[in-house]
Image (cartoon, rainbow, N blue to C red):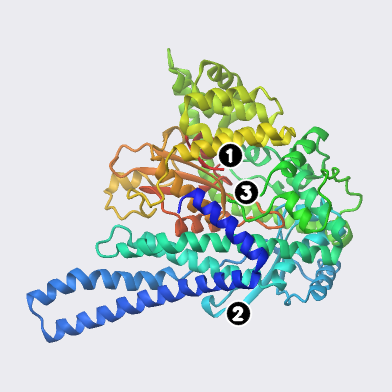
Amino acid sequence: MNRTTFEAEVRRLTELERRDPKTYRRGVTGLVVWGYLALFLMFAGASALVVLLTALLVHAPDPGTVKLAALVGIPALTLAATAVRSTFVRFDPPSGVTVTERDAPALLAAVESIRTALGAPPLHRVVLTGELNAAMLQRPRLGYFGWYENILVLGLPLLRTFDATEVSAIIAHELGHAAGAHGRFGARIYRVRASWMRLAGAVQGRSGLDFVGHFLNGYMPRFLARTFVLARAQEYEADAASVRISGADTAARALVRLNASFPDQAEGYLEAIWRRAASEAKPPMGVISGLVSRLAQPATPAAVERALNAAWYRDTDAADTHPALRDRLRGMGVSVTARPAIATPVATTAATAWLGAHADALQATLDLQWQASAQIDWSRARQAAVAMGEARRRLEGLPSPSADERFELSRVLDNLEGPEASWPLTEALAHEGHAGARYLAGLRLLQRGDASGLSHLTALCAAEPSAVEPACELAASFLFGQARVDEAHEWLRRKAAAREAEGRSPSRPERLSASSVAVDLDGPARAERAGRPAPDRLRPHGCTASEVGWMARELAAAGVSRAVLAEIHVQHRPDVPWFLLVVDPKLQTFRLPPRPDEVVRRVHAQVSLPGQTLVVTREGHGALAKVAATLPGARILG
């Protein structure tokens, strides 16, 4: 099923869910049950075959029987063992501070009041984190056997920037998910998908087990399309719970504020923090506090206007489980004939109303948690900074550097000193026609609200076909923010045409393999691939359009919003390529993004990756991410 067919299937199922939700949901349940049943039948059949062949070997141990056991029994044993291992899917608890009655009695009382009104199940914990978001987690403590732990996750930056009525609407949305047992069913959906993708990755390329891939080619696209539509329907249900508790106007105001009130306060904040690794031995203290302080500052009116326009004029996309802003407001019963007004500043925040004097102590605890969790990546960032410093000295010492070497220097400057330090060189290279510099120049100009960046993207699309999709998406986002809707749709049509022109195959390309490729690397090769690579070793990935298309679809299904792919240059065993994949989790309104380790684990479980692939998130790997993103064709999703 290619992307066009998938989008058509999503539209068909969306209409079916609207007309006959019971029939639609029975279909989803049937696919989930079939996924579990197929796993069980595969395990049972393989196990029975192993037992039968073992008995045959015992009773008739002749050369023919031994050969049969080797040819059939070993793949069957592999399949049985892998089927069992693939079902062990971890659901880690969230990190953060669990609030108590002593810390936040008013907050817990407000949450309990909303929970009771909605008839949601009792909560086991309320956890504060350093994110500007919220989430409802229904975590199965006993795996298949359930015993769910209901955890409400609230970001302290959310409490310190929204008022209590808006946070109540957000809490009602999340508890609406719990009241509908969305998290429980979502855990089952996730388990089926992760189990099958793990199984497929483990058996891919093994003789006699090709039928697993054939089954997935038929099952997984239908499974993803149906569960995709279900996730979107559940968002509308949770929005209805928010309206029921807080009223349509308050629920809509909270949604608009999330979409448009913080467009530039924290821009570049974490990147600047990680650049300090070059000169500081330990992660700094007060990172979460600094983020809260920035978010508390009023954004520039122009930036808010752009952010609200970008959310308002976007249509619901077939690749996003969350409906667009207009559709969600329409579902709340709010008029969408005109764009809503920009949310007014908050007079009294929810943190002041519900946490009082304890807010500062909780924030200090989150600061300490961030500092402790960042320690390992901070050491790696220091090593990367040393490597980039050496690369800078080498590049600046070249008598006649090529365009690519000058561009490499611009990337190093960007990572060491920031965008302003690299801008003169990037701008000059863009005017000279360098593809990577054109994209970066277009990106930075559009981020500043300068429409001249469109000319760089236009020239890039004409010269570099592999860059058309990311360039078009970047241009469209800018134009939506400027309320130039017709022009934005024109760029999106060009993006769709480029995708179709690439002729991506609907069948899985043979080159793709599991990320943990089973290759016996010698000592030097293993040592070369240990740890995090230096940014100056990154090269364009060289994958085909078909391979990239498959990865992009599977990454989107795994909850990734943006992905950058690059090949890492190696001296030892270049016949086994080493890739870097930088992923960003999908930022879902009213949902807390998963932790980086959860994102990486999910990608490894659900996505077929080329060669050996190092998967990282942008958090803690900003230097690598920036360098990789500047390579031609590196952006494969988002």
Q: Residue furthest left?
A: 62
Q: Earlier in the sequence, mark 3 or mark 2?
A: 2
Q: Earlier in the sequence, mark 3 or mark 1?
A: 1
Residue 268 shows up from this direction: yes
Q: Quadrant of the C terminus?
A: top right
Q: Quadrant of residue 75?
A: bottom left
Q: Label 3 to label 2, Cα distance in Å? A: 35 Å
| Left or right: 146, with 61 as reference point | right
Judging depth in this view, the residue of 505 and 464 nearest the camera is 505
In the rendering, at what x and y percent does residue 431 appear?
A: 55, 16
**Residues packed near mark 1 inside 10 Å, few (<14), some (14 to 19) or many (20 plus):** many
Image point 81% across, 34% down: which residue?
A: 300
Q: Label 3 to label 1, Cα distance in Å? A: 39 Å
Q: Which residue is mark 2?
A: 147
Q: Earlier in the sequence, mark 1 or mark 2?
A: 2
Q: Tell me if label 3 and label 2 are in contact, CB under 8 Å.
A: no
Tag nearer the camera, 1 or 2: 2
Image point 57% across, 25% down: which residue?
A: 458
Q: Is residue 483 above or below residue 599?
A: above
Q: Amino acid at mark 3?
A: Asp
Q: Is residue 527 above or below residue 16?
A: above
In the rendering, at what x and y percent does residue 466 appear?
A: 46, 33
Q: Quadrant of residue 591?
A: bottom right
Q: Amino acid at mark 1?
A: Ala
**Residues packed near mark 3 inside 10 Å, few (<14), some (14 to 19) or many (20 plus):** few
Q: Quadrant of residue 494?
A: top right
Q: Which residue is mark 1?
A: 277
In the rendering, at what x and y percent does residue 213 appear?
A: 36, 61
Q: Amino acid at mark 2?
A: Trp
Which secondary structure, mark 1?
Answer: helix
Q: Which residue is mark 3?
A: 317
